[in-house]
Structure formats: structure tokens, C-alpha cells
Amino acid sequence: MKMRVLTHPNKALHEKSKIVEADQIKSETTLSLVNDLKETMIEENGVGIAAPQIGVQKQIIIIETEAGPQAFFNPTIIRHSIRKIESEEGCLSVPGVFGIVRRYRNITVQALDEQARVVTIKLGAFPAIVFQHEIDHLNGILFIEKVEKFTDHKNI
């Protein structure tokens, strides 16, 4: 079911999320939440969404991949390049606002997948940016806190 996306300045967007235990990943509650997140991301035309954006303080992100939307639990950046890239970002939780953000060009992420298996993923360019953006949500950070220059905004 499509959920309501919380928007800035909702305080819940600035809370740190809790770890999801491996044995919780296959529970009906978590599977339902993952499906709701996927549906919400698709309906909102997003490329990623984090559980805190719908008011659930759990370390779950959904990322649009070549295989479709996939859930990742407790994602952690375990390696990153020295080089950074600048790109324009927006966010479902900050509608109508876009800005230039500097992020690592390449990252390696470790997480649990939807089968509760540990996965290690090497990412570059746009996919790396999306993962970093969504991981920030899990730590209570919005992209507008990292913007170097706003490119389009109404009210922040």
C-alpha cells in the first residue's frame, strides 16, 4: 500500500534508525513494510526511499536497480574513493527543492538483502549517489544539509 511520505521539517526525518535483526527480515511485518516502501517509491517516481521517510525508524532502504526495486537492510559504507563528484539531487521528503551535493564517486556497501544474506556491493556514479543519499536518511540527515548550491527551490 502506498504510504504518506513525511516532508521537511518533520522531526522524524532527523532521527537515527534502528538496526533490523536478520531474523526479522523475513517476518510478515517486515515483508509488508518492504512492499509498502517499494509501492510508495514507484508511485512517487523515486529511485530510492528509506523507511524513515514514511515514519518507520528502521534501517531499510529501497533502491531502484536494473532488476527492479530491491530492499537493503542495515547498509553501511565500508569503503569509499577519495574522489568526489558533484550532482544535482532532489528528495521525496523535500518536494520542489534541488541542489548540488558532493558525494563519493565510488563506494562499497555491505548490507543484508531480502533473504537476510550479507551482500557486498561496489557502486559508482549515480547508483553510488543514490545509496549515499538513502543511507543519510537512516542517520537523520537530509540532502539539503549537504547542498553546496540550490538549483531550484520554493520554500525550505
Image (spheres, rainbow, N blue to C red):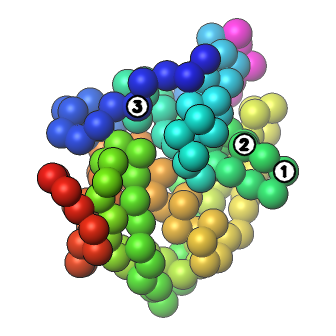
Viewer-nearest residue: 18 or 133: 133
Q: Which residue is mark 2?
A: 70
The image position of residue 117, as x and y in percent, is 79, 39
The image position of residue 118, as x and y in percent, is 74, 45
Q: Earlier in the sequence, mark 3 or mark 1?
A: 3
**From mark 3 to mark 1, how far is it between C-alphas?**
24 Å
Q: Is residue 148 left or right of residue 34?
A: left
The image position of residue 143, as x and y in percent, is 32, 59
Mark 1 is on which residue type? Answer: Ala
Badge nearest the viewer, 3 or 2: 3
Residue contact at pointers 1 and 2, CB within 8 angstroms: yes
**Dot 3 lies on which element?**
loop
The residue sitting at the right extreme is 67
Q: Which residue is mark 3?
A: 5
Q: Range of the magenta residues?
A: 21-28
Q: Residue at x 63, y 11 (%)?
A: 29
Instruction: Please say whether residue 34 is visible from this viewpoint.
Output: no
Instruction: Please say whether residue 66 is visible from this viewpoint.
Output: yes
The residue sitting at the top extreme is 28
Looking at the picture, does residue 38 appear above or below residue 156?
above
Mark 3 is on which residue type? Answer: Val
Q: Earlier in the sequence, mark 3 or mark 2?
A: 3
Q: Residue at x 46, y 85 (%)?
A: 85
Q: Which residue is mark 1?
A: 67
Residue contact at pointers 3 and 2, CB within 8 angstroms: no
**From mark 3 to mark 2, how far is it between C-alphas?**
18 Å
